[in-house]
Amino acid sequence: MSADFPPPPGVVPGVVPDIIPAVASDLAAELAQMRARFEAIVSNTPGLVYQFVREADGSVSFPYLSDGCQALLGLTPAALHAAPEHFLDLILPEDRGAYLDAMQASASALSGWNWEGRIWIDAWKDVKWINLRATPHPLPGGAVRWDGMMTNITASKQEQHEVRQSRARLAELSAHTDRVKEQERTRIAREIHDELGGNLTAIKMALAMLAARLDDADPALRERTDYLDALVDRTIDAVHRISLDLRPALLDLGLVAALEWQVREFDRQAGIDTTFSYNQRDMGLDEDQSTALFRIAQEALTNIAKHAEASRVSVKLARLRHYVSLKITDDGRGIRQADRAKPASFGLRGMAERTRALGGTLTLSHAPGGGTVVAIKIRHESPCGAATGLQ
């Protein structure tokens, strides 16, 4: 048995209330307004806003493509809708693997898809760098949809390339300057040693001959002669010291011999107990490499003497299978991060530049128990010998 209920007041039986069309009209207006806002945002967004779907069978589609498609890819949205697989063809062959790997990683982990690579724009016969960023959403049946944006990053890539080229040219200039400086040091050191040293030796010999004839001369004259002889001796010592500072002659005998001398001098002058060890005399380095490593060691020891407040220092040189390692360790107060970033830290910067010019690496770390470890590694191409025990 059914019950008949009277219609609401003002409603005629069998007539659809006017409220339903009104609600539908309001919803349609609101939807149109939201779409207009979305289109306004998208049209003012640089690049291409898109949706990309990969089905479980590997087929792909672009459910949505903004008007930026033509400007970025040289294709209309309609053309890419009709042939979505053509996007992969735009990517340069050497970049496609990374693109597919990034897509698969994003789909597997449902993590953000971030990829950049080059595409060929046939319409303009040009190559562009693009960056793709998208968020994945799983769909029924194993499909994945990405909502994202592609942007043109060609200009920034060109700037990065120019910066790298500029840095490379600066590094080459720095390395060339170091080589020229070392050549000039060598020339000056040899001239001082040979010319000035030779002249001073001749003066000393002449003074000795003169002194031999002054046995019965005026004591004041004899005293003056002895003073000149002592002055010549001091000048010869100064010439020898300056020549060694400019370029130790022991560098001609190899890096190990030069570092042995430098460590002895540092121990004597700085009053810091310093040891030197090595595993082979022949490090397999050319003259430029040996000189650069020697200068790095000199700068590191100078920094220790000035700033470290250390009581012990060890210098270790090792030739390994593929590289030569130089490690300088002190037990001082250590180096702070702020010290490394100081604009006037030319010592550290110079060490890093020299190492970089050799194609090597320089690292600064804290030593166990306090202090600093400066570690330099540079590659060598000559085969490594069998000796490994430190001397």
Image (cartoon, grey):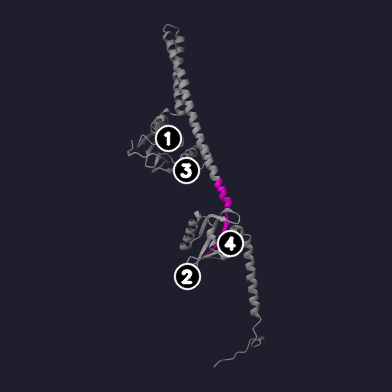
Q: Which residue is drawn at 49% across and 33% down?
A: 179
Q: Which numbered disc, 3 or 1, marks the residue that appears first in the sequence? A: 1
Label 4 is placed on what type of residue? Val
Residue 23 occupies quadrant = bottom right
Q: Which of marks 3 and 4 is in front?
A: 4
What's under tag 3, amino acid-wise?
A: Arg
Marks 1/4: CA distance?
56 Å
Q: Do the residues labelled 1 and 2 touch (CB within 8 Å)?
A: no
x then y, percent, for residue 65? 58, 64
Q: What element carries label 2?
A: helix
Distance from label 2 to label 4 (Cα)? 25 Å
Categorize mark 1 by other alpha carbons within 10 Å: few (<14), some (14-19), many (20+). few
- Judged by depth in the image, the label closer to the viewer, 2 or 3, is 2
- Magenta residues span 141-162
Q: Which residue is drawn at 47% across and 61% down?
A: 104
Of residues 133 and 61, which is closer to you in this image? 61
Question: Which is nearer the N-term, disc 1 or disc 4?
Answer: 4
Q: Position of residue 67 (x, y in %)?
A: 62, 62
Q: Are marks 1 and 4 in contact (CB under 8 Å)?
A: no
Left or right of 52, for residue 367: left
Q: On the image, numbered disc 3 is attached to which residue?
A: 336
